[in-house]
Image (cartoon, rainbow, N blue to C red):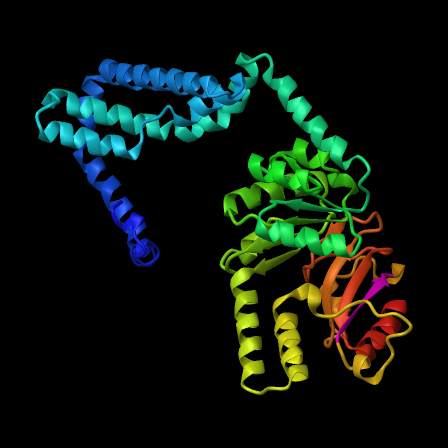
Amino acid sequence: MLISETEYRIQVEAQIRPFHDVLLGLFFITIGMLLDWRLIWLQWPLVLALVTVPVLFKLGLVALLARLLGASSGVALRTGLYLAQAGEFGFVLLTLSRREGLLAPELFNPILAAMVLSMLATPFIIMGSNRLVMRLVASEWLQQSLQMTRIASQSINAQGHVLICGYGRSGQAMARVLEQEGIPYMALDLDPDRVRQARAAGHAVAFGDAAKPQALIAAGLNRASAVVITTLDLHGVMQVLGSIRAQAPQLPVIVRTQTDRDLDKLRAAGATEVVPESHEGSLMLAGHALALVGVPMRRVVRIMRDQRDQRYRLLRGWFHGADDASVDELAEERLQAFTLPDAVEGRRLADVLAPLEALRPISMRSHTGAPLPIDPDTVLQGGETLVLSGTAEPLARAANVLAA
């Protein structure tokens, strides 16, 4: 606390951060070793009372304070439910109270057990808080409906827009690029101050939780052309991906992360592409370093492009048109979509691609447009669309093979 008021706080925080989780785990292990479960079983009525009464008292106190500070009844009750359980600092106070003789020794274990049980109940209380609030607060459903109506009124004219989940620095930068290109967008964010200031500046942003299907639908999810998730919280991103895939499984989704540690998990959850900041930052550092040491700028740009092509599967080629027939571009990787003939029906994807070793499958869709998995054992049907990546000559051979 003392160091946090000095100019050394950032350096000190960076140095002690690796020990944070270790010390926190050691703290909880120590507390758990103090607990005698046999005494809890013998004194369960007292433990039950110590769990119920303080939690209800704290719930009422927090809800009352939130209400007095201007929160709505639903928000106040939800805040009380989130904060009613015992916290880590309570264990410190409990241990100090026993050491200083302020607490009778026979009450230590029952109180400790009550605090542990209240913390164990926290995730279940939070998961059921919305249903409880909706049942107890009659106006809550109306307020949620008004919130969805406000979001829908902002996006009602949007068609083929990009839906941005999270309007922080990255989300705002994305919005500026889209606005310069004349592409409509709609953003959702949970910071009321940020939303208020952005809306005052004329940005298309609304207050809403992108993890809730109602907010996504109100923001025009089914009319959007793509979704960009800019938040870094993995749990929140997984929730948003789940909501999007449940409502619009064919919609492309781009996810921002700090590192590529959870890349496979995010792709399995439905992310079309994952962009790690660490990778992009290292590329920019390398590009500037190469330019400063005298490497020609054209070569720097080519190196950066090649590195991105290796990392991002969506950048490993593009769909060419009739005016893309230069010699250089004929040697570069491109994408081409093939409609599978009836002759391949019943065959495995691996068998069809066997004579096309120089090509990579990128995506596949059914005749209805639904995405299909790129799996060697996938049984093909006529009329499905297969997108392959490669250079011009192998793609031309593939056209002959798949037309047979």
Is residue 271 visible in the rendered image? The answer is no
Is residue 172 visible in the rendered image? The answer is yes
Residue 262 lies within the magenta run:
no
Displayed quadrant of residue 310: bottom right
Specify start and end residues of the magenta stretch as a single range. Answer: 333-340
Location of residue 204 in the rendering, given as x and y in whole percent from the top left corner = 71, 41
Depicted 130 relative to depicted 273: above or below: above
What's the residue at 54%, 42% (across, down)? 236
* Number of marks in picture: 0
Displayed quadrant of residue 346: bottom right
What's the residue at 52%, 22% (across, down)? 75
What's the residue at 87%, 79% (across, down)? 325
What's the residue at 63%, 70% (across, down)? 308
Q: Is residue 171 left or right of residue 249?
A: left
Q: Nearer the viewer, residue 125 or 64?
A: 64
Image quarter hosting the N terminus: top left
The single residue placed furthest to the left in the displayed view is 101
Depicted 5 relative to depicted 222: above or below: below
Residue 337 lies within the magenta run:
yes
Depicted 104 relative to depicted 99: above or below: above
Location of residue 348 in the rendering, given as x and y in whole percent from the top left corner = 74, 61
Location of residue 378 in the rendering, given as x and y in whole percent from the top left corner = 71, 57
Displayed quadrant of residue 306: bottom right
Q: Is residue 367 left or right of residue 1?
A: right
Chief secondary structure of the magenta portion: strand
Depicted 128 relative to depicted 269: above or below: above
Q: Is residue 55 left or right of residue 285?
A: left
Q: Nearer the viewer, residue 104 or 150?
A: 150
Location of residue 69 in the rendering, given as x and y in whole percent from the top left corner = 46, 21
Image quarter hosting the C terminus: bottom right
